[in-house]
Image (cartoon, rainbow, N blue to C red):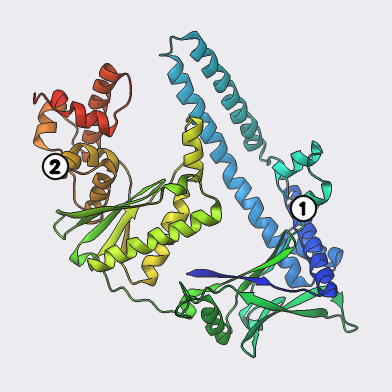
Amino acid sequence: MKITARGEIPALSDEAKIAVDDLMRIFSSAIRYSFQRMIEGLMSVGDIEKDVASRYGLNIRQAKDAVEDARQTLISQRKLLPEYVKNYAKKAEAIEKKLKHVKSEKKRKALLSKLDKRQRKRDYYQQFLTSNTLPPVVFGGKKTFHQVCAKTVAKEEWRDKRSNRVYARGDKTKKGNPNLRILYLDEKFFLEISTLAKTPSGRSVKVTVPLYIAQKKSKKTGMINGRNYRQMLIDYLHTGDAYQVEILRRKGRYYVHVTFDEAAVRAYKVEYTGHAGLVGIDTNPDGFALTHIDRTGNYRHHTAIARHELTYARSNRRENLIGEMVKEVIQYAKDRQCGVAFEDLKFEHDQDSQRKFSRIRHNFIYRQMLTMLERTCIRNGIEYTKVKPAFTSKIGLYKYTHQYGLDVHHGAALVIARRAYGMKEKVPRLLREKLLPTKSPSTEWKRWAMIHQRIEKEAKLNTKGSVTPEFWRSQRKEILGLT
């Protein structure tokens, strides 16, 4: 499991600053050059590496790192292209379905305008997919580039964003990282940088600068708050294994990210398993919904860990809030001596939505929430299980919210925990008799899908809307004929 320790170069002499800035500028230019050669497809990767090394005056390791960075960018662009086509095609298809039921001329005109935009976007990306080419890639950011074209941002600012980083992969045979080496001397960290300048013998001139590794100490106790990244990095340097270093320049400050294998310095054992129960976790834009069940799948307790600020906070603030929530989740599981289960979410941007919800969904960094939760479970020895998210909310709403007095999110968390045990969610007799035909589907999920369609039809007849938890709670008796 990889881990990244963050740091900063607190001070640079004028000579060292010029050397580092030149290295960033040349390295970034080498990445762009390599990217274009790969798109042309006339040279092999090995030939590009040799060409970059001779053209830009980089040593062969620096050239390999620049070419690899360009190769990964190319791979990501090729993977994203079919996703763009699929997402815009689904959006266009959904709008076409809406148009069949729209009677208002004003709304119809708005939907036709939106449909035209989605189709043009789909056709735009489809032409690249058909011709096996890629859309233009703007290094430094497309938004900043357009601002430069509009003369609202100085050209120097855009150039600075295009040339603000350098990184080097590690090498175990060279005891860590030969181009950006971390040194620990006299209880202080230093960063040894291989610059573009050469010695008479042809070797790179080394520049050594002080390095501060971020560490947060309690003002009251003097103890380290959170994880002791500084000590972990010290322990890792003693192993002599490879580590990756990246230097980023932002607003005149130089930040350093050191990535290494956490397993080399920390061994974790699973102490809390699902034998004593599970905590199901439903992930939402504003936090986690937790439901505890015993080994037989019966409900025991539920709670919510939410931070409503998540939907609008800045990225650094969101990361801190997620860390606090994950800490509470782990403590909840430890107190009950059990494992956890959560969804294996894979969201796609293939649906149109209103502006407010689009903003919330954009800030819904579910990947970061679940990744941080997974890593923290490993570090604390908690067994975790990922399950398919299909119908968890619907089953929780129709089957468990009334039975246990839960809201839809805690009902979904209950279904997630039971699914982690491999338990089936049979349709209750009342729902089966009232909402399913005599010859109902044999599979569990098809039955729940048919039940949801039947209830959704009732919702549209009564409220001209979709099924909401409020609608089900208020109309449940009427729909099931219990009044």
N-term-proximal mark, 1 vs 2: 1
What is the secondary structure assignment of the residue under circle 2?
helix
47 above or below 344?
below
- The image quadrant where one finds the C terminus is top left
Q: Quadrant of residue 230?
A: bottom right
Whole-angstrom CA distance, mark 1 to mark 2, is 63 Å
Q: Residue furthest right?
A: 200
| Near-viewer residue (369 or 356) | 356
- Say whether residue 210 is left or right of residue 4: right
Q: Position of residue 33 (x, y in %)?
A: 79, 55
Q: Which residue is mark 2?
A: 403
| Near-viewer residue (432 or 257) | 257
281 above or below 103?
below
Mark 1 and mark 2 residues within 8 Å of each other at the beta carbon: no
- Residue occupying image coordinates x 58% and y 83%: 237
The amino acid at mark 2 is Gln
Q: Quadrant of residue 10?
A: bottom right
Q: Residue furthest bottom?
A: 186
The answer to whether one can see residue 231 in this image is yes
The amino acid at mark 1 is Arg
Q: Residues within 10 Å of mark 1 (few under 14, many from 20)?
A: some
- Say whether residue 439 is left or right of residue 61: left
Q: Position of residue 27 (x, y in %)?
A: 77, 63
Q: Position of residue 296 (x, y in %)?
A: 13, 57
| Near-viewer residue (380 or 483) | 483
The answer to whether one can see residue 350 in this image is no
Q: Which residue is mark 1?
A: 37
- Residue occupying image coordinates x 48% and y 29%: 354
Please tell me whether mark 1 or mark 2 is closer to you in this view: 2
What is the secondary structure assignment of the residue under circle 1?
helix
Which numbered disc covers residue 404? none
- Residue occupying image coordinates x 54% and y 13%: 109
